[in-house]
Amino acid sequence: MKTFLATFFTLSLLLHSIAGFGFVVSDKQAGEQTKATSLQLVSSPELLNLTSDWVANFKNQHPDKDITIRTMTSETALTEDQLYLTTHQPQVIPEEISWKMIIGHDIIVPIIHSNNPLIQAIQQQGIHAEDLAQLIVEHSNWSQVLEGAPSQSAQIYLVDQEQIRAKLASYTQVSPADIQATAFSSAAELLAAMQQDVKAIGFCKLADVIASNNTTFASNICILPIDKNRNGRLDRFENIYQSPEALTRGVWLGKYPRELSTEIYAMAVSKPDQQNALDFLSWVNNNGQELLAASGYSYLSSREKTANIEALIQPNAQPTPGNNTPGLPLGWILAAALVLVLFFVYRLIHSKQEDLAEIGSDDIEITTAMNEDAIEAPAGLFYDKTHTWAFMERDGLVKIGIDDFLQHLTGPLTQVKLKEPGTEIRKGEKILTIIREGKQLEIHSPVSGVIKAQNQSLLNAPVQLNTAPYSDGWVYQIEPLNWSREVRLLFRVDTYRDWLEDEFTRLKDFLAHAANTNTLAFEHLVLQDGGELTDNVLADLAPEVWDDFQTKFIDTSK
């Protein structure tokens, strides 16, 4: 293996040196071919005013730039030299488009008065789609949608815009015509009415309620928190409503209902390499953000802007002006590269043969992407937030085990610790320890009862928890104590899959945040292109990462 690595790095340096020396002239010629070309923007109709403002302000600061604007139509032909600006959802973006970047948001928010007498309960429980549907259609009062609330009416206000009605109808799954609300022609009128009615709920754009300092909300206004996973409480990962920055970042991470937000995209057939396009996009991600609010749109979060700017940086540095260093002929360079590649393949084959003597079959793994579609969730089972499942058999005993999501994270398990038959357990109590190479997670029971049998085959083959978590990998048979009551607290498969979307979002946020604060512990963390998680993402991470995961995903969900 050491020989292979040494060969790899040596060849990399040689190729880099040859490429850097030989392609000076070629890079210069390529730069001359694309220099000073005109940038063509194609804007969808709803963004035409914003696009025009962006271009006018950009050209004021860069008078040498040549930019033209066209309006997008159904007949617009997609070409390599154009940049498209649109709010179209990803599912309707043409297949020819292979590159896109979010450059702004269009976010609809429910708002309440900060002196609402129910503010504490609202911020603890949140409001989900069904609650809002009752409020905007049936004129329900707070007691019908908020546990423990007194019987108080909730007046509904909204800014009279078709887009706001459409998004609200989509989220609550009601007809726009059925929405019963007092409509105002402007956000200023709505906010004035909200100041007089502390119990009301209003609907407008996020840009309408951001204070002039861009860091807080308008005076006496709060965002009504949404219980996205519909579990009757506002979980910690759902609490994204402290500031415009936190909410915008939450939208970016998928913590806010998709039906209430739309992204502004810059798109192209392939990643832009024209300097005018790169300069314009960089400006839009910085100074251009100030123009979004005037058109009713919301700016990017700071992390979004940083990610965008990094994505726009060209991977290959351009030669410095006036560098006339002669380069090798292209034919010689290609020939040298071919020889090096063949030598690299030869060394790779031999190094593999050497390494096979040192590597066991259990160490050879294929790392694939992990997403919601990769998770198995059989219908008929009941699922718990502790990433366990339960199923009542015909004899009245309940089988329990861990879910497919959890085993995908841990990778192949090497040991388990089980409780003995006859042990009485309570829902939320630790009943199982799963271990991979010394790193472990303590799993909580989804139900209460007495253990009647344990799956002893797991003691010799714990990997069954990975290969068959819902069949051969069952953990216990339990005689339930409170099944009829506790089963109502568990998920059926459809609700479970909706909840898993939030778990994936929360997991990505957890890994990204922890990796930034503990680089050493996360040195093996790899995300696929597009931010997709790799399978077995926890497998090779440090023990402290497993401990942190235990605290934030297992213990807090019991």
Image: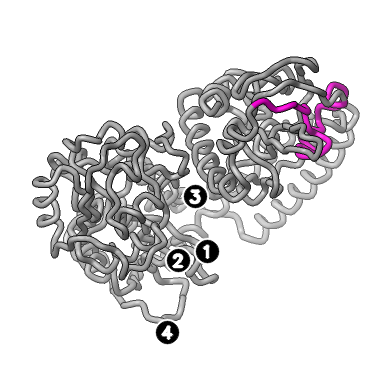
Disc 2: which residue: 268
Disc 1 + disc 2, Cβ < 8 Å: yes
Nearer the observer: mark 3 or 4; the answer is 4
Residue 98 numbered mark, or none: 1
Asked whether the viewer can see residue 536, the reply is no
Disc 3: which residue: 316
The three-letter amino acid code for the residue at tag 3 is Asn
User: What is the magenta range?
Assistant: 457-481
Disc 4: which residue: 75
Task: Describe the element under mark 3 as helix, strand or loop.
Answer: loop
Q: Position of residue 261 (x, y in %)?
A: 36, 56
The CA span between labels 1 and 2 is 7 Å
Horizontal side of 518 relative to 307 (left or right) equals right
Indicate the quadrant where residue 86 lies: bottom left
Task: Describe the element under mark 1 as helix, strand or loop.
Answer: loop
The CA span between labels 3 and 1 is 20 Å
Q: Between 141 and 324, which is closer to the camera in this rendering?
A: 141
Asked whether the viewer can see residue 457, the reply is yes
Is 60 situated above or below 497? below
Q: Position of residue 130 (x, y in %)?
A: 41, 52
